[in-house]
Amino acid sequence: MTSAPSCTVEFRARYAETDQMGIVYHANYLPWCEIGRTELIRRLWRSYAHLEAEGVMLAVTEANLRYHAPARYDDLIRVVTTLSQARSRGVSFDYLIQRVDGETTTRLVSARTDLIAIDRAGATVRIPPHVLDAFRHGKPMEQS
Amino acid sequence: MTSAPSCTVEFRARYAETDQMGIVYHANYLPWCEIGRTELIRRLWRSYAHLEAEGVMLAVTEANLRYHAPARYDDLIRVVTTLSQARSRGVSFDYLIQRVDGETTTRLVSARTDLIAIDRAGATVRIPPHVLDAFRHGKPMEQS
Amino acid sequence: MTSAPSCTVEFRARYAETDQMGIVYHANYLPWCEIGRTELIRRLWRSYAHLEAEGVMLAVTEANLRYHAPARYDDLIRVVTTLSQARSRGVSFDYLIQRVDGETTTRLVSARTDLIAIDRAGATVRIPPHVLDAFRHGKPMEQS
Amino acid sequence: MTSAPSCTVEFRARYAETDQMGIVYHANYLPWCEIGRTELIRRLWRSYAHLEAEGVMLAVTEANLRYHAPARYDDLIRVVTTLSQARSRGVSFDYLIQRVDGETTTRLVSARTDLIAIDRAGATVRIPPHVLDAFRHGKPMEQS
């Protein structure tokens, strides 16, 4: 039995991402999820930019976010991204967004996004088999 | 039986809101929901800015979005916002985001957000009764 | 002697556009300039989207902003946009961003952007003559 | 003779930061400047969050950006920030934003921002002398 592929990225919350409540504006966690997803795709296969170069785009069809505690300016943020599902026409990711403070981590947001593969005209397409294979099993052995 | 209070706002999608997929970036629908919520609160009571001036803030605790079709640059966007629940410590809103093209409307996104009332320190508080009353029944008669 | 073409748009400052200083984040005035520019182009010619459909994009090459007073959440904002220069390969716009409060207006930001015409590959191109003519003289007589 | 203090930060361009032109939207370089400024202040003194905690905020009064070449999604971005002026009531920063591709760097944007010190009410104030001293000379010797 193998666990779902996941990866961790860290960065600091930007001043631009705060609002007048003094916390990170709730929409700004979705770009953080995208950063996590981008890195996981890069590690499992290669840059998502290459997928778009092949004419396949992953469009978000559903997003669910639960806000547990607020991020603040300059917080060290950790995003743990897990590829929870990889189907021929779509993928789903789970995200755990945490604040890191020395040895302590605090759960800020948990989220999930569903994405489908589309072409430039917006029609649903299949994820190329070699990409789907990488998503499911990681890079082929000769690259690992 | 009374229906839930709702309101409609319209504006154009900004170039800044698009991404390289040629459509509006998925996170940018949440600020559109906020525009709808802001207007509904203004019509039911008064500007949300006055609520913050009373020391009560409405913080988003959960957001769910389903993307049906993409918005594009310069599309005329309509947001129909409904106050689906008003409790002593929180409110929930439903949103229908449409593209308007003459007589035709196309459903783009349906969304829901849950918000709780907090004070400046982040502690949960009650929504002031006169505000909750306005949320539930609209403005008092002498103002309508 | 004719004055430079200009137009005025109004909208409200969004909560999403504020930062923890309690005012609109300084980068967010540039999308407001883009709203003004979009409307001025629409009135002088037609939607900028049509220009991109012809394969010509206007890319910003320089932006200068002076911040005189801050915009705040829910302020009624007015952007006065003037087409200050229209050359065969580029255009310049001046912006005056104001807060409107009844009969009173307060100057918030003055700005200028220079844009050049490029094709999809990023190469500099000429603005199509019929577009440049509209920029300089407004729509042809039969449309006015 | 001493050179002006500067620092370098690197990160990747986000998908959220692109627009339908396929490049990073021009307003999104200002938050990148803010990331550079944040890191330089942290290295010269301590986190800017501490300055706000002392009741002193640095508000941008002028921003000038020149766009030389576009950043694209997933580009490795380097921001070189220099503190060009430190006065009792304000500071100025210069920025060089580059794309890093192995050994090659490409100049994307050069920018400058002027900031003044204000209190919570928005009145101009002096930068605390110990902060100004750190800005001018770096951290005191015992910390270096």
Image (cartoon, coloured by chain):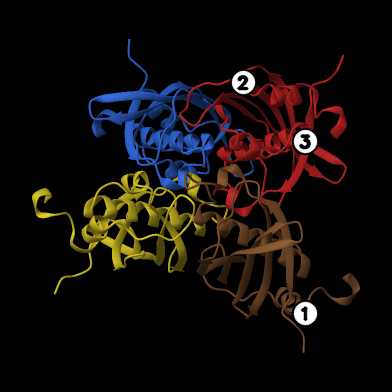
Chain colours: A yellow, B brown, C red, D blue
How far apart marks 2 and 1 lie (CA) works out to 55 Å
How far apart marks 1 and 3 lie (CA) works out to 42 Å
Q: Can you identify the residue that label 2 sits on?
A: C90
Query: The numbered mark 2 sits on a residue in which chain?
Result: C
Q: Are marks 2 and 1 in contact (CB under 8 Å)?
A: no
* Residue B116 appears left or right of D10: right
Most foreground residue, A17 or B12: B12
Q: Is residue C134 visible?
A: yes
Q: Is residue A23 visible?
A: no
Residue appearing at x 43%, y 36% in the figure: D32
Query: The numbered mark 1 sits on a residue in which chain?
Result: B
Q: Amino acid at mark 3?
A: Arg
* Pointer 3 or 2: first along the chain: 3
> Label 2: how many residues lie within 10 Å, few (<14), some (14-19) or many (20+)?
many
The mark lying in front, picked from 2 and 1, is 2
Q: Quadrant of residue C79?
A: top right
Label 3 secondary element: helix
Q: Amino acid at mark 2?
A: Gly
Residue appearing at x 88%, y 76% in the figure: B141
Q: Position of residue A89 (x, y in %)?
A: 36, 64
* Residue A67 appears left or right of C17: left
Residue appearing at x 69%, y 19% in the figure: C86
Most foreground residue, C99 or C41: C41
Determine the residue located farthest toward the bottom in the rendered image: B1
Label 1 secondary element: helix
Q: On screen, B88 above or below D135?
A: below
Q: Can you identify the residue that label 3 sits on?
A: C43
> Label 3: how many residues lie within 10 Å, few (<14), some (14-19) or many (20+)?
some
